Image (cartoon, grey):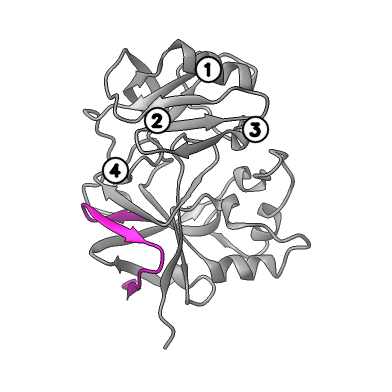
Amino acid sequence: MTTITVSAIYIYPIKGCAGVELTGVRFDERGPQFDRRYMLVDSNDQMVTQRDTPELVLITPTLLPTSLRVSAQGAKELKLSLSQHDGARRRAVIWDHEIEAIDQGDQAAEWFSRVVGRPLRLVRWAEDQVRLVSKKYSDRDAQTAFSDGYPVLLTSEASLADLNSRLVTPVRMERFRPNIVVTGCDAFAEDTWGEIVVEDLGMDVVKPCGRCKIINVDPQTGQVGQEPLKTLASYRVQGRRIVFGQNCIHHGYGNVRVGDPVHVTPRKS
């Protein structure tokens, strides 16, 4: 029997910007540490993502021991302190959630505004804020930060290989912005999982991830095409959503590393 293992780990410190690949990550109450703890907002305090600003994918964060380095072509690097959790509060809206976030100051705002080409502010998640995950699919009292709705996104290499076998031009996993990628299972086997345990960390596999045009953004160029959403729509529709990957809710604190075995409990029918 093939062992299922973790093959890649990603976090996205700034919502909408490029990801950071890690060999291991600590989970806190809101998900992988430093994952989507920063977000850009517009002049109306609304979240800014690749849905409306695909060029965000060309902004690259790098996780350093005490800071987050942010780079973009033609711009001087920006450094943000990871240990600073205070500052001026400002309203920030993500979907139907309105929270108080910590404004990251004029220097960061000017940097992102110049790179993107319109007025933006960078905010950080405030540790005293609570954003609960919807209980539509799970009764667990789980939190998340600036993710779209769930603290963990799981995908598999086999599912991507199945999709790429149908595409003229294969795509990389980065398109789907997962946190945990696994190998050793069949394509879309994750659709049938109810719970997984990685080392000492358990996770409920709660719902398929509905996909939007963000997966059509080329991470290398920021250009938007028709694939792979068009092909996924031909065979991966559940209900009224085009799906790829599974949203998960983790159980408390723990560590996950590349190479860790993944123990699966099937979903109850």
Residue annotated with mark 3: 55
Looking at this view, name the residue that lies furthest to the front. Answer: 65
Depth-wise, is mark 3 or mark 2 nearer the camera? 3
Mark 1: which amino acid? Leu
- Please provide the residue range marked out in magenta: 247-269
Report, in whole angstroms, how far the alpha carbon at label 2 lies from the one at label 4: 18 Å
Mark in the foreground, 1 or 2 = 1
* Chain-order first, disc 2 or disc 4: 4
Which badge, 3 or 2, comes first in the chain's sequence?
Answer: 3
Give the alpha-carbon distance from disc 3 to disc 4, as whole Å: 27 Å
The secondary structure type at the circle numbered 4 is loop
Q: Secondary structure at mark 2?
A: loop
**Pointer 4: residues within 10 angstroms few (<14), some, or many (20+)?**
many
| Disc number for residue 120 | 1
Marks 3 and 2, how far apart in space? 24 Å
Q: Amino acid at mark 3?
A: Glu
CA gap, disc 1 to disc 4?
Answer: 25 Å
Q: Callout 1: helix, strand or loop?
A: loop
Question: How far is the residue under mark 1 from the one under mark 2?
Answer: 20 Å
Residue for point 68% across, 38% down: 222
Residue 71, placed above or below residue 19:
above
